[in-house]
Amino acid sequence: MEKKNNKTKKFLEEFKKFISKGNVLDLAIAVIIGNSFNAIVTSLVNDVIMPLVGIIIGGIHFDTIKITVGEADIMVGSFIQHVVNFLIVAFTIFVVIKTFNKLNHRKEEKKELPKKTDDVILLEEIRDLLKTREK
């Protein structure tokens, strides 16, 4: 019985360490924001883009497009809406990552040269003194 308690305690301690790491919290926040973003994109596709596309192609509502095979309905319109959802999300993520990489690259360019150590400064002074003696 005591072995089970020790294993349980050890397991819970490992879980506590795992869950308290910053990366796990960042990931949880990203998932929550991602779900919210997905809801916005879904609404954009279902409520704005697809009705406009339907009007352009003759008043067809994509959510009603289906193929019936026997007694099964294959919801082609719904599938098309999900593909459009995916493309919008993928494009948005691409733009965000591309922008982030550009900003990160600019920060790296702006970094100053590393501060010289005392040894390097002393060696430069010796070099400069030797140059003045040679002349």
Image (tube, rainbow, N blue to C red):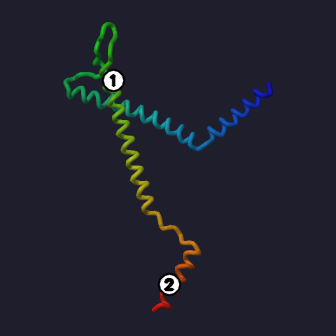
Kindly state the secondary structure of the residue where label 1 is placed.
helix
Numbered label attached to residue 6: none
Residue that numbered label 1 is attached to: 79
Residue 98 placement (x, y as % from top left):
38, 48
Q: Residues within 10 Å of mark 2 (few under 14, many from 20)?
A: few
Residue at the farthest right position = 2
Is 7 placed left or right of 114 in the picture? right
Is 103 placed left or right of 114 in the picture? left
Residue 119 placement (x, y as % from top left):
58, 75
Q: Name the residue: 30% across, 10% down.
A: 69
In the depicted structure, whether residue 13 falls above or below residue 98: above
Q: Residues within 10 Å of mark 1 (few under 14, many from 20)?
A: some
Numbered label attached to residue 128: 2
Q: Name the residue: 43% across, 54% down.
A: 104
Is 122 placed left or right of 110 in the picture? right
Residue at the farthest front position = 134
Q: Quadrant of residue 11?
A: top right
Q: Disc 1 marks which amino acid?
A: Phe
- Label 1 – label 2 distance at C-alpha: 74 Å
Q: Quadrant of residue 103?
A: bottom left
Q: Name the residue: 75% across, 26% down.
A: 4
Judged by depth in the image, the label closer to the viewer, 1 or 2, is: 2
Residue at the farthest top position = 70
- First in sequence: mark 1 or mark 2? 1
Residue 37 placement (x, y as % from top left):
42, 36
Quadrant into which the C terminus falls: bottom left
Kindly state the secondary structure of the residue where label 2 is placed.
helix
Foreground residue among 64 and 7: 7
Foreground residue among 93 and 38: 93
Q: Name the residue: 45% across, 34% down.
A: 36
Q: Disc 2 marks which amino acid?
A: Asp
Residue 97 placement (x, y as % from top left):
40, 46
